[in-house]
Image (spheres, rainbow, N blue to C red):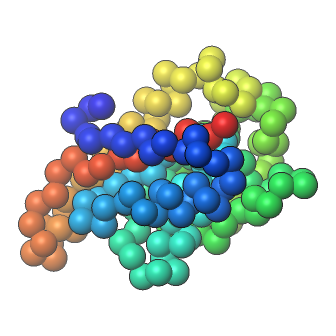
């Protein structure tokens, strides 16, 4: 996992996004920098968890990497969460041929959060652009981690290297 620790919490116990978010918050370790990665429903869960971490005054992730996040779907209670992370701390990837979650939803999120959005010629599972998406996301993860190390050194909290990267897949 590129020298990073990865976790993939088991969400099979429930399809409810709020239950999954609560479970994720229970397994997060605030002592280490982390990047939340989520695809589809997992993208919503990662964004929602970040919102709830901020509301609880807990340590925020150093980055969010969201793939076709399931925001703003009609008939489903997944309104785009308010996002305390902005700009370079958030990176979205979305397929132009996605028929599950419209690309426009990620465009609105990227605009609202002043975040980068990589649009790829692919559909919802991003199977045809996995290498491209992962390469782009990996570059962001290492930028986020380098920033966390610099911050730890500057504030005297010691060097933190290779924090946990939580992988949250949706389905």
Where residue 121 appears, as percent x and y from the top left, is 70, 24
In the orientation shown, which residue stands out farthest toward the front?
Answer: 13
The answer to whether residue 27 of the structure is visible from this angle is yes
Q: Is residue 155 above or below residue 62?
A: below
Query: Exactly how many numbered labels are in the figure?
Result: 0
Residue at 16%, 58% in the rendered image: 160
Q: Is residue 25 above or below residue 116?
A: below
- State the residue in front, 139 or 52: 52
Q: Is residue 68 left or right of residue 7?
A: right
Residue at 76%, 63% in the rendered image: 79
- State the residue in front, 148 or 23: 23
Point out the image quarter for the N terminus.
top left
Where residue 167 appears, as percent x and y from the top left, is 45, 42
Q: Is residue 27 left or right of residue 51?
A: left
Residue at 66%, 42% in the rendered image: 40
Where residue 139 appears, as percent x and y from the top left, is 37, 39
Point out the image quarter for the C terminus.
top right
The answer to which quarter of the image holds residue 34 is bottom left
Q: Is residue 83 above or below residue 120?
A: below
Where residue 136 appears, as percent x and y from the top left, is 46, 35
Q: Is residue 72 left or right of residue 151?
A: right
Residue at 27%, 32% in the rendered image: 2
Q: Is residue 92 left or right of residue 99?
A: left
């Amino acid at each position: 996992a590129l020298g990073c620790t990865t976790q993939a919490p088991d969400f099979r116990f429930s399809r409810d996004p709020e239950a999954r978010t609560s479970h994720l918050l229970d397994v997060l370790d605030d002592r280490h920098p982390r990047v939340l990665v989520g695809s589809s429903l997992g993208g919503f869960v990662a964004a929602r968890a970040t919102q709830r971490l901020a509301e609880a005054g807990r340590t925020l992730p150093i980055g969010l990497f969201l793939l076709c996040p399931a925001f703003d779907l009609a008939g489903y209670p997944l309104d785009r969460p308010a996002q305390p992370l902005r700009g370079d701390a958030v990176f979205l990837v979305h397929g132009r041929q996605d028929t599950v979650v419209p690309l426009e939803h990620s465009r609105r999120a990227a605009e609202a959060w002043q975040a980068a959005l990589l649009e790829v010629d692919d559909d919802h599972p991003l199977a045809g652009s996995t290498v491209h998406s992962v390469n782009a996301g990996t570059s962001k993860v290492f930028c986020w981690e380098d920033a966390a190390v610099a911050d730890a050194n500057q504030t005297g909290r010691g060097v933190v290297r290779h924090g946990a990267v939580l992988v949250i897949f949706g389905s």
